[in-house]
């Protein structure tokens, strides 16, 4: 029997703007099983990226509870959240977010160094090989195409052997052909390494490749 790696119970997120209270998410509840692939879909402004940030411990919810791999995120301070992210979570962003002064190899090494892992360089090189970038590992982000940069960010996302990987519009800045390559690599690595995958996207073709779709509109699940 699979256990749940992520549990949300009546989660809401509000922001104060002057005297007004802006409600971005309302009463979101769902569980995600360990090893599952899930897409959170919805139009721009629906709250899906905010939801992803809450699930990943990048922000606190205003109400409700979030439990990630048995850890109650809503009870943690910023330093504790950072420790949880480093130990359990991988990220892939639409705009790659590679460090421009580091080579592809050095970018992949960063999360490993934060965890003090052993045999780091060999593992980083192996991950770059898996995404087809062995020959580009000493190149800087500015010397790589968008698709190559996203493949480096994929290798980096899996570098700390995360229990769960969050991908925010992972193919949003890529052309169709390159996007398909990155999608295939994402699912391939995910299956190979046994990670839970949560993708935020408005691309229904990408969402259809996951085992489960959670639709969100106007800050609520529909």
Image (cartoon, rainbow, N blue to C red):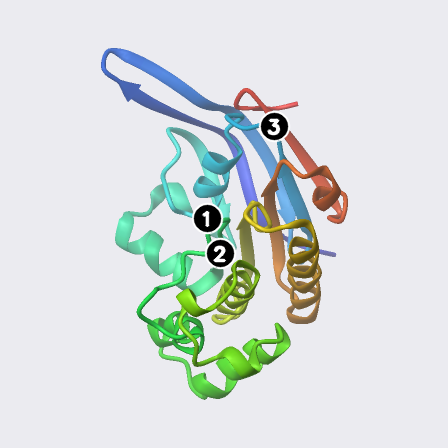
Q: Is residue 15 above or below residue 96?
A: above
Q: How many neighbours does mark 1 have within 10 angstroms: few (below 14), some (14-19), or many (20 or more)?
A: many
What residue sits right under mark 2 in the picture?
91
| Front of the two marks 1 and 2 | 2
Q: Which mark is residue 56?
A: 1
Judging from the image, what secondary structure is the residue with disc 1 in? Answer: loop
Q: Quadrant of residue 74?
A: top left
Q: Is residue 201 above or below residue 16?
A: below
Q: How many neighbours does mark 2 have within 10 angstroms: few (below 14), some (14-19), or many (20 or more)?
A: many
Q: Residue at x 67, y 64 (%)?
A: 185
Closest to the observer, 91 or 36: 91
The quadrant the N terminus occupies is bottom right
Closest to the observer, 122 or 67: 122
Q: Are marks 1 and 3 in contact (CB under 8 Å)?
A: no
Whole-angstrom CA distance, mark 1 to mark 3, is 17 Å
In this view, the residue farthest toward the left is: 18
Whole-angstrom CA distance, mark 1 to mark 2, is 9 Å
Judging from the image, what secondary structure is the residue with disc 2 in? Answer: strand
Closest to the observer, 169 or 17: 169
| Front of the two marks 1 and 3 | 3
Q: Residue at x 66, y 66 (%)?
A: 194
Q: Which mark is residue 216?
A: 3
């Amino acid at each position: 029997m699979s256990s749940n790696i992520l549990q949300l119970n009546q989660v809401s997120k509000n922001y104060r703007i002057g005297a007004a209270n802006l409600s971005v998410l309302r009463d979101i509840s769902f569980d995600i099983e360990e090893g599952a692939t899930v897409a959170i879909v919805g139009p721009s402004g629906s709250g899906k990226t905010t939801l992803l940030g809450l699930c990943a411990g990048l922000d606190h919810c205003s109400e409700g509870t979030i439990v990630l791999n048995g850890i109650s995120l809503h009870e943690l301070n910023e330093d504790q959240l950072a420790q949880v992210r480093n130990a359990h979570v991988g990220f892939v962003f639409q705009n790659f977010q590679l460090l421009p002064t580091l080579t592809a190899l050095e970018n992949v090494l960063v999360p490993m160094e934060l965890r003090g892992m052993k045999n780091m360089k060999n593992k980083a090189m192996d991950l770059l090989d898996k995404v087809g970038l062995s020959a580009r590992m000493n190149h800087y982000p500015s010397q790589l195409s968008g698709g190559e940069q996203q493949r480096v960010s994929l290798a980096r996302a899996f570098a700390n052997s995360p229990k769960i990987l969050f991908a925010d519009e992972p193919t949003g800045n890529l052309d169709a052909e390159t996007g398909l390559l990155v999608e295939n690599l994402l699912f391939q690595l995910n299956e190979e390494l046994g990670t839970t995958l949560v993708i935020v996207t408005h691309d229904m073709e990408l969402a259809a490749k996951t085992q489960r779709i959670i639709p969100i509109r106007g800050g609520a699940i529909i």
